Image (cartoon, coloured by chain):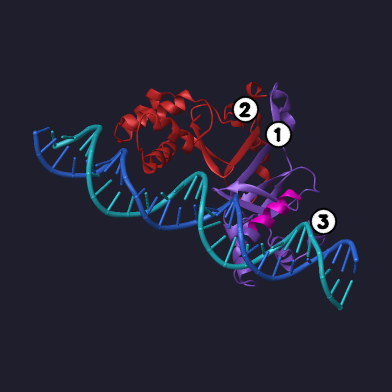
Chain colours: A purple, B red, C cyan, D blue
Amino acid sequence: MQLNEALETLKNEGYKYTKKREDILSFFTEEDGYRTASDLLNYMADKYDGLSYDTVYRNLHLFRDLDILESTDLNGEKHFRLSCGHDEHHHHFICHSCGKTKTIKACPMNYIQQDFPGYTIENHKFEIYGKCPACQ
Amino acid sequence: MQLNEALETLKNEGYKYTKKREDILSFFTEEDGYRTASDLLNYMADKYDGLSYDTVYRNLHLFRDLDILESTDLNGEKHFRLSCGHDEHHHHFICHSCGKTKTIKACPMNYIQQDFPGYTIENHKFEIYGKCPACQ
DNA sequence: ATAATAAATCGTAATCATTACTATTTACAA
DNA sequence: TTGTAAATAGTAATGATTACGATTTATTAT
């Protein structure tokens, strides 16, 4: 997902353009990997004095609802990254040191759907955690 | 993991027996599935007036360190269940309505270890979420 | 261009889960 | 039964997140 594409999505869905929204999106297009609300607050603090929590969280949740961002729970804190929505279904290795990810193409769900008769499967999570080569 | 086995582990590791610890363990042996600290507090409140947060969290973490319990992050809240440590490696379907689990025997890690040269893999998580037959 | 208005943001407080800490109590070993 | 380290109570602090009235701003209609 690119910055322009994300801004386009916002416009198409009837949301207003603000410089803050562009900067939030820039943060995620520049940063490659999972980042927290607090990472974003730090980044934005350089440019804006007294940015509201409300603004940060409202936009993070809006962007996630619009599939511009995706999120995962890590150590009791939500982490966000640019959505991979357009790519084919996959999962992530996540470096617990730098937050960067590597795509896992294999998805175990293909093999085991039939093992759950009577169950409603709503979603699933497959993540590998460790250190990437750069963080060794 | 049974109650007696868990109490035995505590004793062997040099921890003291208390009725509160037994009751906490009973909660998890009676309840089959993932439960939160707050679920446990509710259960214990019936028997103990003014049970301390410290006691609940300290014991939850102790039990997890001793592999009596295992935990997972769900909706920004830690959920605990009896450990499946002795069984062969597996994962869980988790019912988001009642917290009960179903074992998933297949583990995708077997297929993809070799796709991460230069990476240190520390752990992984594979969970399926949905509704179990009883909660439909 | 200007005014109207709905959306976005600010400033701040509230909430929820979790952690921390001192004083007191208790299990257990000598 | 007494000494001691461990466990707990009572409560405050912390960190992430949510909430909300007041104010500002982007966009639409005039």
| Residue at image point 80% right, 48% down | A87
Q: Nearer the viewer, residue A80 or A41?
A: A41
Occupied quadrant, residue A41:
bottom right
Q: Main secondary structure of the magenta part?
A: helix
Give the extent of the magenta segment. Answer: A56-67
Asked if the residues shown at circle 3 and circle 2 are in contact, with their CB atoms under 8 angstroms apart, the answer is no
Disc 3: host chain: A
Instruction: Say if residue B35 shows up in the picture.
Output: yes
Label 2: how many Cα within 10 Å (few below 14, some 14–19, many 20+): few
Q: Which residue is mark 3?
A: A14
Where in the figure is residue C20, as x and y percent of width and height?
Answer: 38, 53
Q: Which image quadrant: the C terminus of chain A?
A: bottom right
Q: Is residue C1 above or below residue A79?
A: below
Any magenta on residue A117? no
Disc 2: host chain: B
For the residues labelled 3 and 1, the Cα–Cα distance comes to 29 Å
